[in-house]
Image (cartoon, rainbow, N blue to C red):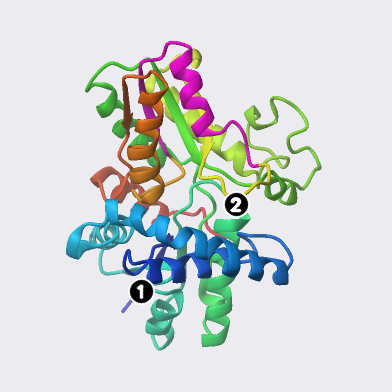
Amino acid sequence: MKKQTGVLLLNLGTPDDPSPAKVGEYLREFLMDPHVVDIPAPVRWILVNQVIVPRRSHASSEAYRKIWHGERGSPLKYHSEDLTRGVSAALGAEYDVKFAMRYRSPSIASVLSEWRGRDLAEIRVLPLYPQYAKATNFSSEEAVREVAAELGIATKLRFLRPFYGDAGFLGAFARRTSEVLREGECDHVLFSFHGLPERQLRKADRENVCLKSGDCCDRPRSPQNDTCYRAHCYATARGIAERLGLPRERWSISFQSRLGRTKWIEPYTDVVLPELAARGARHVVVVCPAFVADCLETLEEIGMRAVELFRGAGGSTLRLVPSLNSEPDWIDAVAELARGESFR
């Protein structure tokens, strides 16, 4: 009998429940990652444990409560579960498909431990972050490698490369966006990506060219931007806009979810939206293609807070494009990625 291939779908994480205590546990685990808050360990410990978590756990708890779905719980988690079932059915018996979270549960260790005694042909790890960043892809890969080494199965690992330009991924987001565009008026489409501190971009810069010219992220894929999160975001937005036939003046890019006082990638979503309203855009559609499943950053930050911000600045309607979640075309795209050759 042919050996099975393990397929691990990996996403970032979510609290176990929306209580302040559990949200605090999640924030502490997430923010203590040196690839997320990349400052010296003693300073990071003080900042996270004595400043950020005490200040943010209750506010974040209230935000999570707004999107929590009863017994199903966190949208990120149940969409991941649904996606896993769909990809498993699409791939068939030759593959054993599971999912894990980088932070909280189901943990990477719990999944890899299940596979420890199995004679799998290999383990294909699919980090579900389309655009490369050390805070997501590198951190997750490092965590998987550490656990696999402890279990003696590290030699079986293969990792999917960032899929920001994958046709299935781009097509699925374009279809979701076109459905929303057909629902009503739209003056402008805003592609809002999760932000990063600018220093993290520069740390990933192999050629010392990052942010030194106005068009560096508009260039095609090259050694200069192969690990550049911002360049990957631009490539994703271009790919979706091209599939939608959007003229360049009708769409733009921004970055959301910044934390702290350090400079993050610009322009900021919460600055761009009032500017769009001031320029006369009354109806805006927001796409968030850094997230393949709806979560706090899409449903609450954009679907609720950004709507209020835009209306308060004079806009009329702001509509959020639902993420890919477990839609059939996305299930097919993930299954194709899992079968493909974009692994290392």
Please determine whether, in this image, residue 114 is positioned above or below residue 12.
below
According to the picture, the residue beneath numbered tag 2 turns out to be 133
Please determine whether, in this image, residue 295 is positioned above or below residue 185.
below
In the rendered structure, the answer to whether residue 83 lies left or right of residue 159 reads: left
Which of the image's four quarters has the N terminus?
bottom left
Q: Tell whether position 284 is magenta.
A: yes
Tell me the element at label 1: loop
Please determine whether, in this image, residue 301 is positioned above or below residue 82.
above
Q: Residue at x 67, y 66 (%)?
A: 44
Q: Residue at x 31, y 19 (%)?
A: 316
According to the picture, the residue beneath numbered tag 1 turns out to be 4
Which of the image's four quarters has the C terminus?
bottom right
Residue in the foreground of this view, choosing between 145 and 333: 145
Quote the CA–CA distance across marks 2 and 1: 30 Å
Q: Residue at x 21, y 57 (%)?
A: 69
Q: What stretch of residues is rendered in magenta?
A: 264-288
Tell me the element at label 2: loop
Q: Is residue 48 visible?
A: yes
